[in-house]
Amino acid sequence: MTSPADPPNGAGASGPGLKLLAVTACPTGIAHTYMAAEKLAQAAESLGHSMKVETQGSIGAENVLSDNDVSQADGVIIAADKDVDRSRFIGKRVLVVAVADGIHRPERLIEQVRNAPVYQGDGHEAERGAAPAASGGGKGRSVTYKALMNGVSYMIPFVVVGGLLIAVSLALGGDTTSKGIVIPDDSFWKTVNDIGSIGFELMIPALSGYIAYAIADRPALVPGMVGGWIAAHGELYDSEAGAGFIGAIVTGFLAGYLVLWIKRVKVPKFVQPIMPIIVIPIVATSALGLFFIHVLGEPISWVFERLTDWLGGLTGTSAALLGIILGLMIAFDMGGPVNKTAFLFGAGLVSKNPEVMGACAAAIPVPPLGQGLATLLRRRMFDDQERETGLAALFMGFFGITEGAIPFAAARPARVIPANMLGGAVAGAIAGVASVEDNVPHGGPIVAVLGAVGGVPMFFVAVVVGTAVTALVTIALMSVGGGGRGADADAGAGGVAEAAVAGEAASSAPSPAGAPVLAGVGSGGGTGAASAAVAAPDATGPKAASVSAAEPRDGGKAKAAPEAAEAAPEAGGQVLSGYLTEQTVRERLAADGKDAAIREMAELLAATGKVADTAELVRAAFAREDQGTTGLGEEIAIPHAKTDAVTAPVVGFARSPEGIEWGAPDGTKARLVFMIAVPEAAAGDEHLRILALLSRKLMGAEFRERLLGAADVGAILRVLGEIE
């Protein structure tokens, strides 16, 4: 067996080849995953090495590396824009890079992996191997963003479950009293409310814990969660309000990087086995907890007290000014010390000056209602998970649960928080000028419905106007910033837009049990999807789709073009399982921009009669582009959509001799444009096989040249008929 630390001298074209492994993965779609796999396998073969590539696309892992593969490997290349489990590669040379590097620099990566650090199981050695291959800098920011999105992704279910259970229990079992909306202790709905409260309390620790987990793996989970719990409970550091989600973000990053630092400490071998399960969690949790309580907690408590005194000094000043200030504070941190200061100030004056609580009550629902409205007004700016969270936020906003907006604020703080604050200030000002009264310490439309508000019409005017302002400002800021979930992120190495997804990113979980990414057609995952991609049936039987340098990628067809042309369908025939026909091929696109090209391709697909709503198909394709460009590089773009606007899977192809700017990571303009559209019911099956086959076949430069040079539609179909 080859020693991982000492690969054969002269290995390569002039000596014995290396036994290499690779893992490719991207957070949305599967095209980049397979393109990187194909390029790495081709490069390894040309350099005289053997390579097996495991692909981790949206349909799961394919061509999985076995223990025997790993034991015999001289090096491992991980080309991924999401977290890949590296524990199986301990003791091997591991190079970690962006998926774009696998596509555009495969030969360079193969050379670099020979001198990559030996992975010892603590994460940072392998991470350092990515630095030389990364381009453009910004890697640290990219890692930070991915960690933040990981925390947000795991936090969202707690927000939704906890918030909705609390809202339902208040609506069905709550009574309006001078102490707010109270549920009787012996009521069934009290139990439901308690369950919801538990879920809501776990929201902040989950955010903190999974930020830390994404940075430093399992040893960081406990200190991250405990740190988040401390941040949320101000009584631990003598503050009437906890630090909220902002404090959780701070503790998450502190815990993650503290654990990374502790991992670097050299310890005797007999201590190493207990480091990740005992020593590191205990040391990191204790250090972080004590630091937050005795160092960070003091300023938080001080801020709370000073804000309370300052607000007390404003009593009796302009109602509009006080309303603006309260609205800004309510919307700023959504449950943190600033928010709680304003709320408790208003609640303390309910019996003496209910107008103060009236301004608070109008501002409280604006952040969740505004963010929920934004997801309805511009759906293509948000991914599927965010749109679902937006609906839950609308419901929580009605019941005065400001925390419903936290997932949006945590994902895009620079855009969402200012929008929330502006809407809250407008709502507070209107309520203050109109002398709206709230006689219970609670907010949201629910208090008006239950009869606790004086001046109901103006209360709703304040809420509606504030909500509209927040939604419109959010959309405007996202548009200016480039839109989409990834707008706050640095695309990082290679500039691959797919790395900006949350979603992705939002789902960029560091364990196989991570939440699924809902991102265009790439997120399907129905039963049988993996098998459909691994074994693509053809006319002669199952055909393995795994990637290995030991087998020619084209099955020899690239070297036998005439025979392939003879076997391909004539003009009017069908290729790609009949999804692409003469009707859906266009020799030349008229469009000169990406948006216009997508519209033109959608109209091309509509000619088949399989598109029930062309406008909705265009919207779905735009939504997929917002999550990450489908410009794959090598002058290729494959826009795709998963939508019931189509009644059956359909594929179109068109050429643009001049090329269209598509935001590809290699900077090339798209000259070969495919469009894939499938109904929701087919999202996890056949179209994934087609996308994988397209991605692989298009990696051949000779194939692309023949496709560009085909004289007419019939010739184009004959070339495309080689894809199987």
Image (spheres, rainbow, N blue to C red):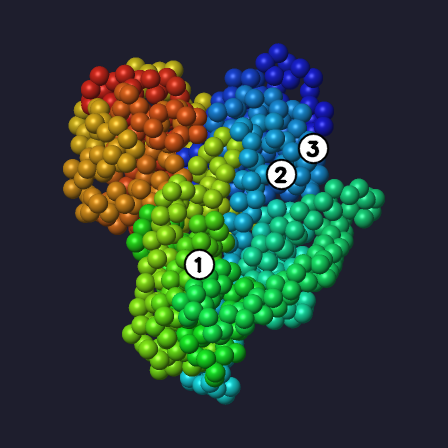
663 shown above or below 56: above
Secondary structure of the residue carrying tag 3 is: loop
Secondary structure of the residue carrying tag 1 is: helix
Residue denoted by label 1 = 421
Q: Amino acid at mark 3?
A: Val
Q: Amino acid at mark 1?
A: Met
Secondary structure of the residue carrying tag 2 is: helix
Q: Earlier in the sequence, mark 2 or mark 1?
A: 2
Of badges 2 and 3, nearer the viewer stands 3
Front position in the image: 447 or 435: 435
Q: Crowdedness of circle 2 by 10 Å Cα count: few (<14), some, many (20+)?
A: few
Residue denoted by label 3 = 118
Q: Position of residue 242 (x, y in %)?
A: 59, 66
Residue at mark 3 to residue at mark 1: CA–CA distance: 49 Å
Indicate left or right for 479 with 601 as reference.
right
Q: Residue at x 82, y 47 (%)?
A: 270
Q: Earlier in the sequence, mark 3 or mark 1?
A: 3
| Marks 3 and 1 close (CB-CB < 8 Å) | no
Of badges 3 and 1, nearer the viewer stands 1
Q: Crowdedness of circle 1 by 10 Å Cα count: few (<14), some, many (20+)?
A: many
Q: Amino acid at mark 2?
A: Asp
Task: Report if residue 53 is visible in the image.
Answer: no
Which quadrant, please, contains the C terminus? top left
Q: Residue at x 51, y 60 (%)?
A: 333
Q: Earlier in the sequence, mark 2 or mark 3?
A: 2
Check the image and name the residue furthest to the front: 317
Q: Residue at x 38, y 42 (%)?
A: 480
- Which disc, if any, is residue 67? 2
